[in-house]
Amino acid sequence: MKRFLFQSSIEQDLEEFSIKTSSFLAIALMLSVLTTIAWASEEKSEITGEQSLQMLMEGNARYASGNASHPDQSAERRSELIAGQHPFAIIVGCSDSRIPPELIFDQGLGDIFVIRTAGQVLDDVAIASIEYGVDHLSVPLVVVLGHDSCGAVTAVVKGGEVEGHLGSLVNFIEPAVEQAREMGNESELLDNSIDNNVYNIVDELKASQPILSEKVEKGELLIVGARYHLESGDVEVFE
């Protein structure tokens, strides 16, 4: 009987030790995750819009020259991102299949926060997505990315009737086309319309209240326009 009681006592002690060890490991793991998140947040909050733009352009230079490094695409990177995301730039781009931002800027998982619609057309949901990236993820840079031969802008330039929800694209892009017509150069009508559309979107975002406009005024957010050139692969940042 004493041997049985002694054995039971050992088993109970071992069970309690196992529970305590598991609890300690769980707490240690939680602290490690929280520390990682805090460190990552602190690291990302220190980067400026200008530095973010430089990182994007360095990535584009690698891509355009055929020397893309394809960073942050490993299994380890996937594991790092389980705790949260800390992108350094927001790309407002066109849905065109030839313009994937992660590729043309040579970035990987968790690096850039992307909003894509045909012709970069903005609605409340798109702007809210940008605000989320700026306000909740502390992203310091927004790039509005147009591109050569944009189908959405081309359709508006050509005119004609549209069906379904396509009218919302026309209504958004039409002011840029009208501005280009007033410039008087018919041979560059499409190119000017594409650029005007980007400029108009940049202006709209800079004036968007209360989140984006306040961040811009405080110097915490940089919003720029750019154009992707299909043939060369280069991204041209507008002044």
Image (cartoon, helix red, strand yellow):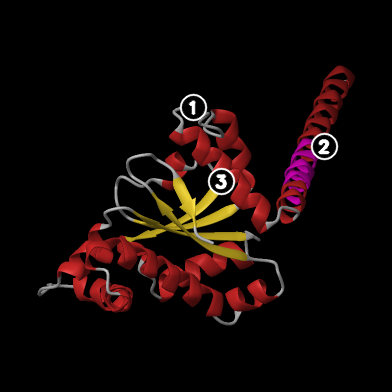
Crowding around mark 3 (Cα neighbors within 10 Å: few <14, some 14 to 19, many 20+) is many
Q: Is residue 132 left or right of residue 4?
A: left
Mark number for residue 67? 1
Q: Earlier in the sequence, mark 3 or mark 2?
A: 2
Q: Residue at x 27, y 69 (%)?
A: 185
- Return the residue at label 3: 56
Magenta residue check for 73 = no
Q: Which residues are magenta?
A: 24-38
Task: Give the image location of residue 100, x and y in percent.
Answer: 38, 45
| Residue appearing at x 55%, y 45% in the figure | 57
Measuring 47% from the left and 51% from the top, which residue is drawn there? 236
The answer to whether residue 108 is above or below residue 44 is above
Residue marked by disc 2: 20
Provide residue 111's location: percent of width, then percent of height. Answer: 56, 45
For disc 2, the neighbor class at 10 Å (few under 14, some 14 to 19, many from 20) is few
Question: What amino acid is at disc 3?
Answer: Leu
Determine the secondary structure under disc 1: loop
Q: Quadrant of residue 118?
A: bottom left
Magenta residues, dominant SS class: helix
Which label is found at residue 139?
A: none
Say what amino acid the circle numbered 1 marks.
Asn
Please, what secondary structure does the residue beneath circle 2 have?
A: helix
> What's the CA distance linking mark 2 and mark 1?
52 Å
